[in-house]
Each structure stands twice: as C-alpha cells, then as structure tokens.
Image (cartoon, rainbow, N blue to C red):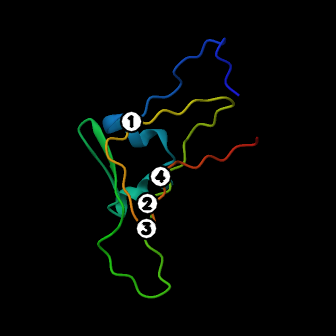
Amino acid sequence: MIDPSQSYTLANECIGDTFFNCFTSSSTLDAINSGLASVDGTSAYLRLNSWVDLEEGEDRPMIHLELETSFENALLMLDVPKVPFGCGTVRHPFSLSRH
C-alpha cells in the first residue's frame, strides 16, 4: 500500500515520441508492426483492430505492452483522452506483481 506520509519521486515518464521507450522492444515492435500502435508528435496511439474480418476460431490482433522496469511500490497515472468501448475491449490495465 502506498503510504501518503512518504515522499515519492517520478521514476518514469512515458510521453509523446518516447512513450514506447518505456516498454520492452518485443512488445512495442509487435504493436507498431501490426498497425495497432503509433506516435504522432506528443501523442501515442493504441488502436483496436476492428477492420479485419476473422475466420471462425481466429484470434484478433491485440496490444500487450510490458514495462522495461518493475517497481516495488508504484502509482501508475494515465492520461487517456479517448477510451474504446464495446465487445472485446478491456478498460483497465492489468498488472502482474509478486503481491
């Protein structure tokens, strides 16, 4: 649990054209090469693949970004101007930790 009496410092800032530098290269390249992720100036874009018609049982391409750094105690802040909605969307990031 984050202790509000403690002092914290900014460890990573993932923003604009350096946004994808915070993530492992394999996860970033998959997202960019599939056309689901891109950077334009000060904004990073993550897209849903809704334009491909799938055969029965075929998986839809997705984005999986894995941070380069792990943290013991952290607060993740996202500034998301437009959140996708509808079938097959997940509106929250998943976090894997030892706790």
Q: Dot 4: what SS?
A: loop
**Does residue 67 appear to the left or right of 42 in the view shown?**
right
> Residue shown at 43%/67% (left/top)?
87
**Does residue 34 appear to the left or right of 64 in the view shown?**
left
- The residues bearing labels 1 and 2 have C-alpha atoms spaced at a distance of 23 Å
Q: Tell me the amino acid under the disc marked 2.
A: Asp
Q: Position of residue 10 (x, y in %)?
A: 51, 21
Residue beneath disc 4:
91
> Residue shown at 38%/58% (left/top)?
85
Whichever of callouts 1 and 2 sits on the residue coming sooner in the sequence is 2
- The residues bearing labels 4 and 2 have C-alpha atoms spaced at a distance of 21 Å
Residue beneath disc 3:
87
Residue beneath disc 1:
79
**Within the image, what quadrant is residue 2 found in?**
top right
Q: What residue occupies the far right of the structure in this picture?
A: 99
Check if mark 4's residue and mark 3's residue have beta carbons within 8 Å: no
Q: Is residue 64 above or below residue 10?
A: below
Whichever of callouts 3 and 2 sits on the residue coming sooner in the sequence is 2
Q: Position of residue 91 (x, y in %)?
A: 47, 52
